[in-house]
Amino acid sequence: MQSGTIKKLVPDRGFGFITAEDGKDYFFHRSATPEFDSLAGGEQVTFEIEASPKGPRAGKVQVA
């Protein structure tokens, strides 16, 4: 599991970005977490890096 911080949320489009501890940003879709509607920018999360057709993305996102 990776650790990171919610960088940006786009609730009306159902996605966001996480900045990992290594400084890289990862896209995530609302389907990656049942907690999407309660997330806020700056919140600490854990996640797994998954492969996708557009490159690595965050999956299994959970509030830390």
Image (cartoon, helix red, strand yellow):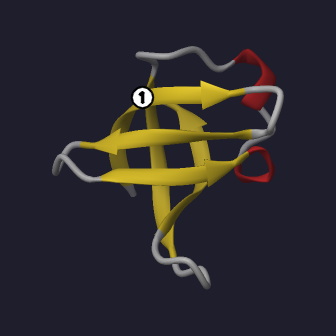
The residue positioned 34% from the left and 38% from the top of the image is 4
> Hey, which quadrant is residue 20 in on the image?
top left
Rendering quarter of residue 49: bottom left
Residue 14 pos. (x, y %): 79, 39
User: Does 15 sit left or right of 12 as displayed?
Assistant: left
How many numbered marks are there?
1
Pick the front one: 10 or 45: 10
State the residue at coordinates (41%, 16%): 42
Q: Secondary structure at mark 1?
A: strand
From the viewer's perspective, is residue 49 above or below residue 14?
A: below
Q: Amino acid at mark 1?
A: Lys
Question: Residue 14, relative to residue 38: is it above or below?
Answer: below
Residue 38: percent from left, percent from top: 73, 16
Mark 1 sits on what residue? 7
| Residue 7 position in % (x across, y down) | 42, 28
Q: Position of residue 24 (x, y in %)?
A: 25, 53
Q: Is residue 2 left or right of residue 23?
A: right
Quarter of the image with the N terminus in it? bottom left
The correct choice, above or below, for 44 with respect to 29 in the image is above
- From the viewer's perspective, is residue 12 above or below residue 24? above
